[in-house]
Amino acid sequence: MANNPFACPVCRRPHGALFEGPCADCLAQIAQERPPACPRCVGETVWVECWECGGEGEHDAYELDPIWYEPGDTEECSQCDGEGGWWHCEACAGERLREATGCS
């Protein structure tokens, strides 16, 4: 299996496909480890932690309003929709800022 052209170069298992490259399992793993590409410019993105919930995705509702909530009650963060943050593209953010301000 050492020089098998139909073996995955990542896990070294034969994948039976008639092409060189990673197998479907390895491609899925690689895709999960990489940040998603920007849908607008296909550039790199970085994860920005939500400043409203501190990356938790939820708030302590009792701390916000002890009259309406019981201790331990939580509420989904409205800023990040419970995700704890979002993927951010610096290139598109700069372009949108220039468009909004009229600067070039």
Image (cartoon, rainbow, N blue to C red):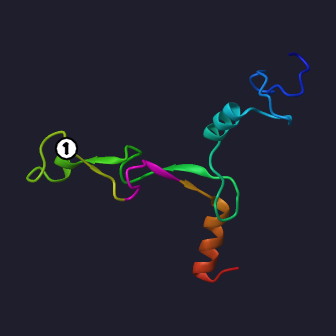
Could you classify mark 1 by the number of other residues whose Cα lies within 10 Å: few (under 14), some (14-19), or many (20 or more)?
some
Quadrant of residue 18 in the image?
Answer: top right
Quadrant that contains the N terminus: top right
Up-down relation of residue 35 to residue 100 (above or below): above
The amino acid on which the numbered mark 1 sits, given as a three-letter code, is: Asp
Question: What range is drawn magenta here?
Answer: 79-86
| Residue 22 shown in magenta | no
Residue on which the image places disc 1: 73
Image position of 62 (left or right of 52): left
Name the residue rendered at 91%, 20% in the picture.
3
Give the percent coordinates (x, y) of residue 63: 19, 47
Up-down relation of residue 60 to residue 8 (above or below): below
Quadrant that contains the C terminus: bottom right
Image position of 86 (left or right of 96): left
Up-down relation of residue 76 to residue 104 (above or below): above
Quadrant of residue 28 in the image?
Answer: top right
Residue farthest along the left direction in this orientation: 67
Q: Is residue 13 or residue 32 the one in the foreground?
A: 13
Give the percent coordinates (x, y) of residue 98: 64, 76
Name the residue rendered at 74%, 32% in the picture.
23
| Residue 82 shown in magenta | yes
Q: Is residue 95 or residue 24 the one in the foreground?
A: 24
Give the percent coordinates (x, y) of residue 40: 65, 65
Give the percent coordinates (x, y) of residue 54: 39, 46
Name the residue rendered at 57%, 56% in the picture.
88
User: In what element is the residue under mark 1?
Assistant: loop
